[in-house]
Image (spheres, rainbow, N blue to C red):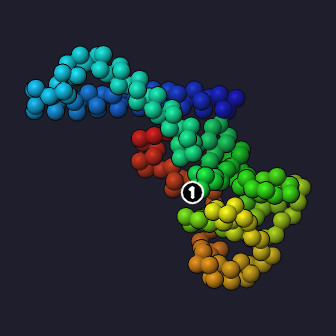
Amino acid sequence: MEVLFHGIFSIFKLALLGCIYATLTLLSFRIIGLLKPTSWFNRVSKKKIKFWFKSGALISVGLVVFSSTHWGNHGLGDFATIPLRHGKVVNQINGTQAFIDIEYQYGDLFIGDFAKTSDYVVGKTETSPVDDPRDYFAWNLKTNEVTYFDTKEEFEAYSEMNNLPKSKEFKSFWEHYKAFWNGWRFWTLL
């Protein structure tokens, strides 16, 4: 049910953004047309309603296409996603369980607080219902390999050696999510 409501909200928001961007596009074309009366911009924007509908539809379709790409997908319903480099993501379900989709003997690896760089995600693992993983991990996004550590000291030594964030720099999934999907992405996209 959450997915349905979020899906309807997303379609409404995309249509509204399409209308807003179409209006801004029309205004821009009209201003350029007034400054250069013989230009293509002036000819195209003379039929204001037709131009507004066509540009709004085109922009809305573009936003829908972008929202289904790796960098535009932020999750739907109770599922949230933070895109990373190399086609990888950190996911969260039900607003409580963050996980990474790797080859792990019990499926997805549940994680707690973490930090990310352009090529690594490092953090604390969470106990899942079926296993008790080691306490810390370092996920190399390029190779999709995960290195596990039993103690904080082991992790800190590895982190120091590979110039990775330390455990004191870990943040929750929602802090990372808000930082990534805030600002221009929130207001201009989804």
Whether residue 62 appears in this view of the structure is yes
Q: Which residue sits at x=29%, y=32%?
A: 24
Q: Nearer the viewer, residue 75 or 85?
A: 85
Labels in figure, total: 1
Residue 81 versus residue 8 in the image, above or below: below
- Of the 4 image quadrants, the one containing the N terminus is top right
- Write down the quadrant of residue 7 in the picture: top right
In this figure, which residue is indicated by the disc labeled 1? 85
Residue in front for this viewpoint, 49 or 174: 49
Question: Which residue shows up at 41% across the image and 41% down it?
Answer: 188
Is residue 114 among what the camera can see?
no
| Residue 137 in picture, x, y percent from top left | 73, 69
Please state the horizontal and vertical placement of residue 67, each as a whole percent of the image.
53, 38
Disc 1 on helix, strand or loop?
helix
Estimate the x, y position of residue 84 in percent, counting from the top left.
58, 55
40 relative position to 132: left or right? left
Residue 115: percent from left, percent from top? 61, 66
Q: Nearer the viewer, residue 78 or 142?
A: 142
Q: Quadrant of residue 135?
A: bottom right
Q: Of the residues shown, which amino acid type is indicated by label 1?
A: Arg
Q: Residue at x 33, y 28 (%)?
A: 22
